[in-house]
Image: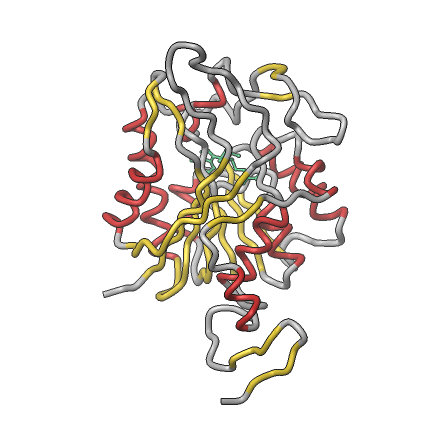
Amino acid sequence: MEVKKDIEGKYDKRNKLNDLTGKEWLKLTCSFWFSEKCADDKDAFKHPAPFLIKDIQKLISLFSKKGMRILDPFCGSATSLLASSYMGRYGIGIDLNSGYKELAKERLSKKGFEEFTHYEYHIGDSKDLLDNIINIDYIITSPPYHNILQNKGAGLRKESQKGYRNGSRIGIDYYSDMPNDLGNKKSYEDFLESLKAIMSKCFNVLNNKKYCSIIISDFTVDKKEVCVQGDVVRMMQEIGFEFVGTIAIFQSNKPLYPFGYPYTYKINHHHQNIINFRKVAK
Ligand SMILES: C[S@@+](CC[C@H](N)C(=O)[O-])C[C@H]1O[C@@H](n2cnc3c(N)ncnc32)[C@H](O)[C@@H]1O
């Protein structure tokens, strides 16, 4: 077996998944990660729920190689496209809200990345636009969390002194008023059904044996705690994806709220689930 010498470990030429050495790969198989911030995350704050760049870079490094095509069907402020461009992958994003494309272009052009050279961003409903996409090597995405941004208890937070959005609540901001926005689905069941329709099309465009990661946390529906992770895994298995494990990503700087105190136990969700799947076509 030929190997490339590297101070971080050795690269195995049989590795078809990524460009990591054995040591680097092993580190990322841990079932929990700590969320990592960087200064450029602030450029996305006009969007109510952006990813953090470094978290997505880690996923892209684990699940793809240089030159591969990465899809995000709920692209928002385009953190996934920025992370892909930084890492020499070609990112393809879709979002319903045209305002987010403006924000995305600002973020990407500030770093010297250009549309159709380094990435592409399409405006519209993923359910329709995915019919025009082919040959995807990795999908990283996060859908709206049903309608939780429209709850009075969720929404915008003031920036803390350190410049991160973990201060007191200052209002509500949601993605759009469009009926096909998954954040506007009347019931949780409608939300899951619409998500399934989009993820089924994602299955079609993903190359065989490649991976798909969905980032979502559990949340409450009508004040009742829901195991969203369980529902998403079942839904993806029904489509044909194989479930390959969840990474809990800790958000340790969020404040704790005394939701049920002193009467009932109510959980504070301080981690997101990165739920990972593989397409293994029969
Ligand atoms: C959780 S946010 C994604 C944020 C993104 N990861 C980022 O870093 O900015 C979900 C996004 O899904 C978009 N969206 C909702 N329904 C959609 C649909 N049917 N097709 C495409 N995008 C949709 C919303 O506009 C919103 O920007």
Q: Residue furthest front?
A: 262
Tell me where residue 42 appears, x and y as whole percent. 71, 36
Q: Nearer the viewer, residue 225 or 39?
A: 225
Q: Residue furthest top?
A: 263
Answer above or below: position of 213 versus 278: above
Q: Nearer the viewer, residue 25 or 113?
A: 25
Tell me where residue 99 appears, x and y as whole percent. 61, 32
Q: Residue at x 54, y 68 (%)?
A: 65
Q: Is residue 17 left or right of residue 264?
A: right
Answer above or below: position of 210 versus 73: below
Q: Is residue 226 left or right of residue 273?
A: left
Q: Nearer the viewer, residue 123 or 69?
A: 69
Tell me where residue 227 appears, x and y as whole percent. 32, 33
Q: Residue at x 45, y 12 (%)?
A: 261
Q: Residue at x 45, y 60 (%)?
A: 136
Image quadrant containing the C terminus: bottom left
Tell me where residue 257 appears, x and y as whole percent. 53, 19
Q: Is residue 15 left or right of residue 20?
A: left
